[in-house]
Structures are given as C-alpha cells and as structure tokens.
Image (cartoon, grey):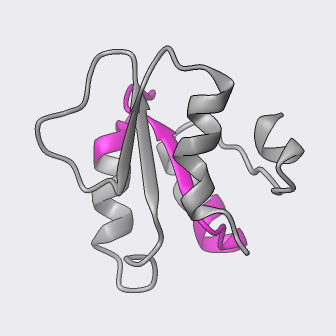
Amino acid sequence: MVLRDLGCDALTARDAESALDVIEQQDPDFVISDIKLPGIDGVELARRIKSDRRLDKKPVLLMSAFGEPRSHDGDGFLAKPFDIDGFIDFVSPYLAA
C-alpha cells in the first residue's frame, strides 16, 4: 500500500522462483525481498538477479527481522520491524523520477 501511495505499481510474488519470473516479464525498477522465503531465500534471489547480465543493474533491497546477512548481493538492507517513514526513506532513492 505504501508503494502504491508513492505512485508505484507494486508487483508481488509468492516465492523467489515466482519473483524471478515476474522480474523477467515485468521488468520492475527495483526489487524488495525478505530474506526468509519459501524455497530459495532472498540472499539467493539477489545473487541470481545480480549474476544475470540482463538484470545485474537492477537494485535489490533486502529486509529481515533476523539481522543483515554477513554476505549478500543486495543493494540495501532494512531491519524489521520498521516504521512507514523508515520504509519510505529506504525506497526513495530507487523510485523512478
């Protein structure tokens, strides 16, 4: 809802595998993913995006209530819980102008 209020078309996926399909088909401006996902996790999702020449420039923003992973290919990390203002600050640099 917050992204839509900011004028973004927010796409969703039920897991990382589905997210990869959505990313390839819809070409979003950036990706937001939780670390904990069914199947492959958000760290692996970010790695796959960044290792694909067609997608490697796409910002990947990760979030988790379990702390930032020691190593990841994400472009940003947001700890949960967070407030709406913190989320807006987190995504604002990636919003299309």
Q: Residue at x 59, y 72 (%)?
A: 24
The span picked out in magenta is 22-43
Q: Nearer the viewer, residue 38 or 62?
A: 62
Horizontal side, residue 1 vs residue 11: left or right: right
Horizontal side, residue 7 vs residue 25: left or right: right
Please state, as top left, top right, bottom left or bottom right, where the N terminus lies in the image: top right
Percent across and percent down for residue 37 are: 44, 29
Question: Visible in this render: residue 55?
Answer: yes
Please state, as top left, top right, bottom left or bottom right, where the C terminus lies in the image: bottom right
Q: Residue at x 13, y 44 (%)?
A: 71
Percent across and percent down for residue 28 are: 66, 67
Q: Quadrant of residue 70 in the image?
A: top left
Q: Residue at x 32, y 53 (%)?
A: 74
Percent across and percent down for residue 86 are: 56, 31
- Residue farthest toward the bottom in the current orientation of the protein: 53
Q: Nearer the viewer, residue 16 or 70?
A: 70
Q: Is residue 34 magenta?
A: yes
How many numbered marks are there?
0
